[in-house]
Amino acid sequence: MDPRLSAHEAFAVNASAVTRNYEVQPRLDYRTVSGVNGPLVILDNVKFPKYSEIVQLTLPDGSRRSGQVLEVQGKRAIVQVFEGTPGIDAKATRIEFTG
């Protein structure tokens, strides 16, 4: 079988790749909330957190909130949650760093 494609087949493959619905998964998903204090969430054991990085928090009920890293201390990150912290559970809340 010839591995080369005709021009029409190559166009169809490229067009489908452009219009494909990609779902990008986060590189790391953390469940390391060690504390909540007002609008701040403290995360431990975070690999390479960056100052001002935007994070997405997924609460146990499936609702999502966003926040921003305010302070980094080694593997600890302090995040300000924009929509408030009620409902954030230390064991079940997932945090995704968007980079």
Image (tube, helix red, strand yellow):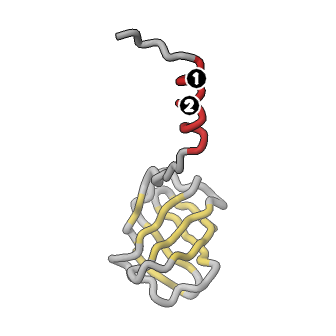
Does residue 52 appear to the left or right of 26 in the view shown?
right
Q: Is residue 50 above or below residue 65?
A: above
Q: Determine which residue is flagged by label 2.
A: 12
Q: Amino acid at mark 2?
A: Ala
Q: Determine which residue is flagged by label 1.
A: 8
Q: Is residue 37 above or below residue 54?
A: below
Q: Quadrant of residue 18?
A: top right
Neighbor class of circle 2 (other Cα within 10 Å; few <14, some 14-19, many 20+) is few
Q: Position of residue 79 (x, y in %)?
A: 57, 71
Q: Position of residue 85 (x, y in %)?
A: 53, 85
Label 2 to label 1: alpha-carbon separation: 6 Å
Is residue 6 or residue 52 the one in the foreground?
Answer: 6
Q: Is residue 40 above or below residue 76?
A: below
Q: Look at 59% across and 85% down and name the residue there.
A: 84
Is residue 7 or residue 27 the one in the foreground?
Answer: 7
Does residue 45 appear to the left or right of 9 in the view shown?
left
Q: Look at 40% across and 9% down and name the residue there.
A: 2
Q: Look at 40% across and 75% down and name the residue there.
A: 93
Element at badge 2?
Answer: helix
